[in-house]
Image (spheres, rainbow, N blue to C red):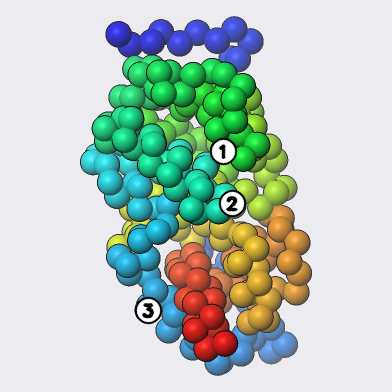
Amino acid sequence: MRNNLSIKGKENNYPPLSSSSIPTRSQLPIETKDQKMNCKTRELLTEYAAKYETADFLTGDPSWFMHQVEGPHNQEVMALIASSLSYGNRKLFMPKIQLFLKESRGNIYSWIKDNSFTVAIPDTPERFYRLQTYHHVHQLFMGIQDILIKHGSIGEFVKERSTTAHNAITAMIRHFHLWDVGHLVPKSTTSSCKRVCMLLRWMVRDCSPVDLGLWTFIDKRTLIIPLDTHVMEEAKRLGLLATTQPSMRTAQKLTDELRKVFPDDPLKGDFALFGYGIQKAITT
C-alpha cells in the first residue's frame, strides 16, 4: 500500500530558484599570457581523460550501482543514494550501498516510494556507517520519498528548480535540510558539496560509458568538479591549484582551470586527474 506522506512542520512549497544564465564560450574567462596553462599539462590531461573514461572505470566505483538498475527513475534514485554514502573507505561503504540494491531487488524507486525500505532501514539510533545512524539513512529515504510522491522523479524535482549545476546543488541542499540526514547531504553551498557534484556529473554528462546523461536540462558546461583530497593533491601537483582547502570556491577555481582544456565539458577533467594519479602511482 502506498504511503500517504504527511509531515507536519516540513512544508517545502518554496519558490523555484532563479536560473543563472548558461555561459557561452565567449563569456568564459579569457586567459592572459601569465595564465596560460603549460602545454605539457594540457597534453597530459587530454591524454588521461581519453584513456581512463572507459567502462573499466566503473569497477570498484560507486557509479557502478546506477548501472545495475533499469530505467531512469531507478537510476536517479540509486545514484542519489550511492553518491550520498560515498565517503571514507570504499571497502566499507560499497557493501552498504549493495545492501540497498539487494533489498530493493533492483526496483529501488518503488522500494522507496512505497515505504518498503522501512523493514531494512528502521528509524533507530544504531550506527549504520561511521557517524551516520539508521535514523539518518531513514530520514534520507523519507526525503527522497517526498520528492517521488510530489514530483514523480528526482529529475523532475531538479528540472523545476534549475538549469545550472549550482542551482541544482542549492535545490538539493535546501530540500534535504528539512530532514535529519546527518552528513549524508551537505548543509551549505559554501562547502565543496563533493557528493552532490558527483551526482550531477553522473546525471548530466552525456556520451560517456560512465555517466548517464539523463538530465539534459542542465548544461554540462556548468558542472562543478567533485572535490576531494585525491583530486586536490593531483591538481596541486599539476599546478592547477595552490591550495588544498576543500570549499566550493576551490572547486569552482579548479573547474575553471579544467575548462581551459575541456571548454565544452570541463568534468572530463575529473577522469584526467584520476588517471594522472594512477600514472604517478605506477611510476613511483
Question: Which mark is on residue 51?
Answer: 3
How far apart in space, not on screen, are marks 2 and 3 (Cα)? 26 Å
| Quadrant location of the N terminus in the rendered image | top left
Residue drawn at x 60%, y 15% as measured from the top left: 10
Residue 51, given in percent of the width and then of the height, sits at 37, 79
Q: Is residue 197 left or right of residue 247?
A: left
Q: Is residue 88 left or right of residue 198?
A: right
The three-letter code of the residue at mark 3 reads: Lys
Residue 150, given in percent of the width and then of the height, sits at 42, 19
Would you name the residue on which mark 1 appears? 129
Of mark 2 and mark 3, the one earlier in the sequence is 3
Secondary structure of the residue carrying numbered label 1: strand
Secondary structure of the residue carrying numbered label 2: loop
Task: Please say if the residues under marks 1 and 2 sit with CB atoms less than 8 Å apart.
Answer: yes
What crowding class fits label 2: few (fewer than 14 Cα within 10 Å), some (14-19), or many (20 or more)?
Answer: few
Of mark 1 and mark 3, the one earlier in the sequence is 3
The three-letter code of the residue at mark 1 reads: Tyr
Q: Is residue 198 above or below residue 139?
A: below
Residue 142, given in percent of the width and then of the height, sits at 49, 21
Secondary structure of the residue carrying numbered label 3: helix
Residue drawn at x 46%, y 24% as measured from the top left: 121
The answer to whether residue 82 shows anywhere in this view is yes
Would you name the residue on which mark 2 appears? 88
Q: Is residue 55 above or below residue 126?
A: below
**Quadrant hosting residue 277:** bottom right
